[in-house]
Amino acid sequence: KCLWEDVEMAPEDPILGVTLAYNKDTSAVKLNLGVGAYRTEEGKPFVLESVRKAEAILAADRSRNKEYLPITGLAAFNKLSRELILENDCPALVENRVATIQCLSGTGSLRVGADFLAAHYPNAAIYLPDPTWGNHKGIFPASGLCMKKYRYYNSQSRGLDIEGMIKDLKSAPSGSVVLLHGCAHNPTGVDPLPEQWEVIRQVIRDKGHLPFFDCAYQGFASGDLSQDAAAVRSFAGDGGELLIAQSFAKNMGLYGERVGALSVVCRSEVIAKKLESQVKIIIRKMYSSPPIHGASIVTTVLGDKELREEWMSELRGMANRIIQMRKQLYDALILRETPGDWSHILNQIGMFTYSGLNKEQVAVMTRDYHVYMTSNGRISMAGLSPSTVPHLADAIHAAVT
Ligand code: PMP
């Protein structure tokens, strides 16, 4: 008998598996709207010009080497990252009480944060919005945290279930960890309004819960870095603790570079220092230290006035293109008189439209129209272009009629 003969074949990841199925399809009209990666109008991956320029600067600099980074990553990157998500004059920054650690993109930042909580905030469950990004349900239990959910989305109104959410946060045991999407909630595209955020913040603070913000889309939702960081900033501004996982995958198009950061806002500089020392122990055992290239790109772009401005304009361009796609898809469905109310396509925020299409309807779209998306009906708008909108509208029309 061979070793591992009885090991079962694991299922594909529900999101990444969509791309595998798409790759096997030989149809000329096939369309991949599964994974959340930005595409140009021609459907091609996009390397930002600001990133290319930063890479040229880095390549020309003969003084650079490939020594190990410290366990916590590139110090300049960490500083620029926390200044990007928080405000420059935020008391937590001024008082030096934010510990920031370069991690492997958003996923790695969440996972290091989860491992830290498992070691230094034990016995607390983490509450996730229902629904949430599928990988959250993998990451937190993998660190040994107990996972619970709070109501978030109302499928009737296709909006936020604010009452359910507040009730669930109030009835969670004091001191629970609450995972929040900083902006552009994935998969629903539904974010609380500013006044709803304020109510959420008060309940979380009143109950002594610990907020953990997943910020994978800063600047990508509205095109405006401050607007997309407003919720996180209000929590950071109230003096209480919070964790922040940042990713540069989407907003700088650095998907495969795996660059992100975990920041922990503490109540004092001394605590932040102690905490960083503990996170170092976790990382040393896991992957020792993070990669250098992506963090150097981010540092070069954010640290140079001109490159930073160019990046912000490219970011606005990406966000606006997605907003345009929403309008075009909506218009195309109206033109076809597709039954149903499609206004949520216009109202939802960020990369995805949570279409309301069910598993069977998605299966029809894939079978008859070669349109690939996750079975929960989530459409990555970033994968759409003016030339493919009519095909998608035809597919949706056929699936619902
Ligand atoms: N959180 C959410 C909600 C996401 O949608 C993503 C990307 N799909 C991530 C985190 C992290 O992605 P990455 O690890 O590529 O930065």
Image (cartoon, rainbow, N blue to C red):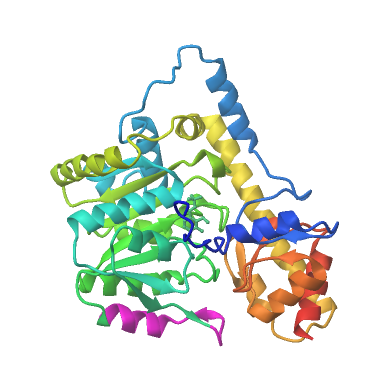
Q: Is residue 159 magenta?
A: yes
Identify the residue at horizontal 32%, vertical 67% (top origin).
178
Query: What range is drawn magenta here?
Result: 155-170
Is residue 331 visible to us here? Answer: no
Q: Residue at 54% of width from left, 61% of height from top?
A: 13
The reply to whether residue 9 is in sight is yes
Asked if residue 235 lies left or right of residue 383, the reply is left
Q: Residue 77: horizontal and vertical position, in percent?
A: 40, 34
Whether 80 is drawn above or below 179: the answer is above
| Residue positioned 76% across, 80% down in the render | 399
Q: Position of residue 381 (x, y in %)?
A: 67, 61
Spot the residue most to the left: 270
Viewer-closest of 253 and 141: 141
Residue visible at 22% across and 45% down in the picture: 97
Q: Position of residue 217 (x, y in %)?
A: 51, 54
Q: Is residue 357 left or right of residue 242?
A: right
